[in-house]
Image (cartoon, rainbow, N blue to C red):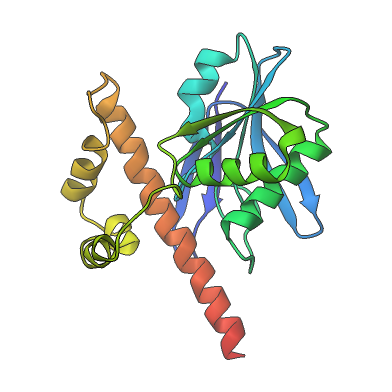
Amino acid sequence: MPSALRLNFSMTTTETVIYPYPLRYQSIHDDITLSYMDTGSGTKTILFVHGLANYAAAWKYQLSGLSSTYRCIAVDLPGNGFSSRGDFPYSMFFYAECIRQFIEQHKLTDVILCGHSMGAQVSTIVALRYPHLVSKLVLVAPAGIERFSGTDILFMQAMLNIGDFLYADEFHLETAIRDSFETASPDMPKMMEEKKTNGESAVTSMAKHDHSIHTRHAE
């Protein structure tokens, strides 16, 4: 049965986040605990790493489809879902080290590492730094491997802003999500609702984190 958990994203709002499988927790450091889902019982393990402003349940369709053949684990990166929040670096290398520690503490071997967008960049770093931990690498719409000219960079800085995307109105969010797919799935309306909820939750979460950092720095 899915787990419906209430997650406090800010001082004033509480969201209900649905995880399709029971949520578990693994302490990987003194002040870092990762929440994750673990389902399936195959001889090979796929470890799923989500992208920016998302969480482990983004992989629910993959977990449902692959868990009959593979052991499937999807983690919440720090600062996302129910994993620890704090004054962490939140860099690609920081996330990569978190994944490395998670793999080692679970004594996983020959892991198939599957990452989406930012999670694909994190997964690539793990595979390059610790090739003995990873047997295969699956990159879904990977970030971090593009090459841009100076003109491209100036154009994107002028036209694209992550804050503008996350705070965009409903119409622009739907347009951005729909344009991310070459062909529309029958589940598109449902998936868009999930994406909009994830984006709104990420905004309040990041706003709370930014406020706490600025408060500590002011002190």
Q: Is residue 76 visible?
A: no
Residue 63 percent location from the top left of the image: 54, 21
Q: Is residue 25 visible?
A: yes
Vertical placement of 45 versus 98: above or below?
Answer: above
The spot of residue 140 in percent (x, y) is 44, 33
- Image position, residue 56 (x, y; %): 54, 37
Pick the residue in front: 56 or 43.
Answer: 43
Q: Nearer the viewer, residue 137 or 199?
A: 137
Residue at 82% over, 39% down: 105
Going by the image, does 133 lie left or right of 88?
right
Which of 107 and 9 lies nearest the eye of the viewer? Answer: 107
The residue drawn where x is 50% and y is 67% is: 208
Residue at position x 18%, y 42% from top?
A: 175
Which quadrant holds residue 191? top left
Q: Quadrant of the N terminus?
A: top right
| Residue 142 percent across, percent down from the top left | 44, 40
Q: Quadrant of residue 102?
A: top right
